[in-house]
Image: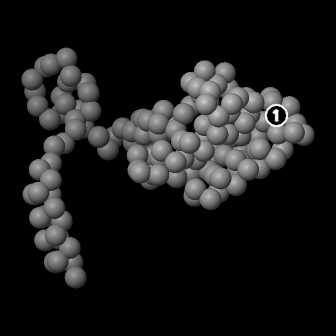
Amino acid sequence: MMIKLSRACHAIRYVKHFISQETLGTVYFPYFHSILLYGIIFWGNSAYSSNIFKIQKRIIRIIMNARNRDSCHQLFKNLKILPLKSQYIFSLLLIVAKNRDLYESNSEIHTINTRFSSDLHTPTANLTTFQKRSLLFWNQSF
């Protein structure tokens, strides 16, 4: 995935000299953004996300003709592009919204009327217990 994103960055850098800045912004979406969205749910919160965000900032700077040390905060706003972390959060929210029936609200778990009763219930898990159960399941499966 990183190779494809780097190639998209190189392609945008190459065509920068032949097309306008507005067209470069349009080229960003099919060449980079589509690849970014393809795997964002899987690696949006992984260790690779910082490298991917660096490539995204590099492309934004190329499109906006900014220097390497310039801040990208306003550049993202000008191009109306979400940074990687924001896009990751937005993608997760879309999944939850589309699959709302798979999640329980706090009011479905208990009958106490609190200000958080309409929030989604986040189950807690003891990591050690979860690991032991997973290991037992794994051993029983094979």
Q: Is residue 26 visible?
A: no
Q: Total of numbered circles in the picture?
A: 1
Residue denoted by label 1: 23
The front one of 118 and 20 is 20
Crowd tier of the residue under label 1, counting other residues whose Cα lies within 10 Å: few below 14, some 14–19, many 20 or above: few
Instruction: Give the residue displayed 21% in from the left and 22% down from the top.
Output: 116
Measured as percent of width and height from the top left, residue 108 is found at 18, 33
Whether residue 101 sits left or right of residue 66 in the image: it is left
Q: Residue at x 84, y 44 (%)?
A: 15
Q: Quadrant where the N terminus lies? A: bottom right
Occupied quadrant, residue 140:
bottom left
Residues 57 and 82: in front is 57
Q: Is residue 22 left or right of residue 7?
A: right
In the image as oriented, which residue stretches furthest toward the top? 115
Q: Residue at x 70, y 55 (%)?
A: 7
Residue 137: image quadrant is: bottom left
Q: Observer-nearest residue: 101 or 6?
A: 6
> Quick one: 17 or 26, which is closer to the camera?
17
Would you say residue 3 is visible in this rendering? yes
Q: Residue at x 77, y 44 (%)?
A: 13
Q: Quadrant of the C terminus?
A: bottom left
Residue 127 position in % (x across, y down): 15, 53
Identify residue type, mark 1. Thr
What secondary structure is marked by label 1? helix
- Looking at the image, residue 23 sits to the left or right of residue 57; the answer is right
Q: Position of residue 128 (x, y in %)?
A: 11, 57
Q: What is the quadrant of residue 63 in the picture?
A: top right
Q: Residue furthest right?
A: 18
Measured along the vertical axis of the image, is residue 141 above or below residue 79? below
